[in-house]
Amino acid sequence: MEEEPWSKATLRVWAGEMTVEEIGAALKVGAERSDRLWCVDAGGGDLHLDDLLKLVEALLSEHRESLVQVAARCDVDLFVSWSPKSGQDSVCLGPNLIKLLGELGAHVVMDTFTD
């Protein structure tokens, strides 16, 4: 039996000049965190990757001002992980998402999983 495809999109902020607590306070978004990393997952595990990326775009738009301030002091990235369909699969980063990530100087990390 073939496993269902899955996807995850996580906005990550790495503690730099700020602590993880300071990052969370500045962004006012509930998120997972460790001593070096603040991160928020977009949506649930059953959403298609394209839908998750739209949620990330909405999160970036909503918190743009505070994210720009935090990104001036910390590294930011978008971690995209998915199980591609057999054969060929793609991911599309729209122009507005790219623009928002660019304002943060954020990297996009692509992580695929196949057997």
Image (tube, grey):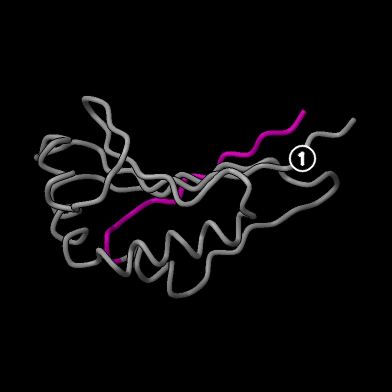
Q: Secondary structure at mark 1?
A: loop
In the rendered structure, the answer to whether residue 95 lies left or right of residue 40 reads right
Q: Quadrant of the C terminus?
A: top right
Residue at the spot of label 1: 4
The image shows residue 79 at horizontal and vertical percentages of 46, 44
Write the residue at 63% across / 47% down: 46
Q: Quadrant of the N terminus?
A: top right
Disc 1 residue type (three-letter): Glu
Q: Which residues are magenta?
A: 103-115
Write the residue at 60% across / 64% down: 92
The image shows residue 51 at horizontal and vertical percentages of 57, 61
| Outermost right residue | 1
Magenta stretch: residue 29 in it? no
Q: Is residue 87 above or below residue 58?
A: above
Write the residue at 25% across / 50% down: 29
In this view, the residue in front, 3 or 74, is 3
The image shows residue 78 at horizontal and vertical percentages of 41, 49
